Amino acid sequence: MSIAENLQAIKSKLPAHVKLVAVSKFKPAADIMEAYNAGHKIFGENRVQEMVDKQQALPADIEWHMIGHLQTNKVKYMAGFVHLVHGVDSFKLLQEIDRQAQKVGRVQNCLLQMHIAQEETKFGFSREEVLGMLASDDFAALQNIAVCGLMGMASLTEDSGQVRNEFKSLRLFFDELKTGYFVNNTAFAEMSMGMSGDYKIAIDEGSTIIRVGSSIFGGR
Ligand SMILES: *Cc1c(COP(=O)(O)O)cnc(C)c1O
C-alpha cells in the first residue's frame, strides 16, 4: 500500500480525540510530501538536526514534533518552531527549553516522558522525580514552558498484557496529576502513547496522541 493509503487506513479508525503524529525519522522529504499531499500535516522526528533540515525544506504549515531523546545543547536549534517536545526527561532539559523559548518569545509545549517500561534502556522520569520537580520553586519559576501532559513507551514485548499494564500505569499517573497538581490547568490534557505495534492498546488505555512510523512509511 502507498503512504497515502496507509495513512487513510489508520486515520479512518482513529477516535476523534486521538491525534496522529506520523513519524518520519530517516525517511526522505519526498515521503513526507506524499503524506502532506494526502492531507497530513503532523510529523515527528527523533533527531534535532534532521528535523531542522526538513523543517527548512518543507511547507511552513507542517506541525513538527520532537519525539526522541534530547540533549540540552540541541534545544536552541529547534526552539523557534517545534510544536511539541515529547521526550522531556529531566529538569535540566526543561530549564534549557524554557531558556531557549524565552529567547525566541515563545511558550514551548512539552510532555514529561515517564519511564513505564521494564527495560532499563528506555528514558524517562520516575513518579517520585516528577512529584519532586513539580513541588519545587525552581519549577514554579519557569515562565516559557507549558506542560501539556505525559509521554511513555511500553516495553518491546509480545506480551500485550504487559504493554497494556504499562500504558495503564501512565494513565493512572496522568489522572493523579490531573486531579492534583494540574487541576486548574487546561493545558495538561495529553497522553502520548502508542506506536505502530501497540497503538490500538494505547488508545484503549486513554492515549490522545499516537506516534506511528513504520505502519505509514514502511520499515526503516
Ligand atoms: C521511532 C519512534 C516511533 C515510531 O515507531 P514505529 O514502530 O515505527 O511506529 C514512536 N515513538 C518514538 C519515540 C520513536 O522513536
Image: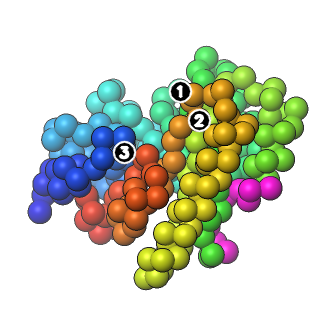
Q: Secondary structure at mark 3?
A: loop
The amino acid on which the numbered mark 3 sits, given as a three-letter code, is Val
Measured from the top left, where is residue 170 in percent x and y?
59, 57
Residue 103 sits inside the magenta stretch: no
Q: CA distance from mark 2 to mark 1?
A: 22 Å
Query: Residue at 81% of width from left, 44% of height from top?
Result: 133
Q: Is residue 29 visible?
A: no
Q: Are marks 2 and 1 in contact (CB under 8 Å)?
A: no
Q: How far from the left and from the top, in percent, is residue 210? A: 40, 52
- Residue lying at 55% horizontally and 70% vertically, measured from the top left: 165
Indicate left or right for 180 with 190 as reference.
right
Circle nearer the N terminus (1, 3): 3
Give the camera-side residue of 16 and 25.
16
**Quarter of the N terminus within the rendering:** bottom left
Q: Nearer the viewer, mark 2 or mark 1?
A: 2
Q: Residue at x 64, y 72 (%)?
A: 121
Quadrant of the rendered structure where residue 214 is?
bottom left
- Looking at the picture, how far across and down is residue 52, in whole percent? 45, 39
Of discs 1 and 3, which sits in the foreground?
A: 3
Residue ID for mark 1: 80
Quarter of the image for residue 56 reads top left
- Identify the disc placed on residue 18: 3
| x and y percentages locating residue 213 in the rendered image | 34, 59
**Marks 2 & 3, CB-CB < 8 Å contact:** no
Which span is picked out in magenta?
120-128
Prevalent SS, magenta region: loop
Circle 2 crowding by C-alpha within 10 Å: few under 14, some 14–19, many from 20: many
Using the image, determine if residue 187 lies above or below residue 179: above
Q: Amino acid at mark 2?
A: Phe
Please, what is the three-letter code of the amino acid marked with disc 1? Answer: Gly
Which disc, if any, is residue 188? 2
Which badge, 2 or 1, is on the more N-terminal residue? 1
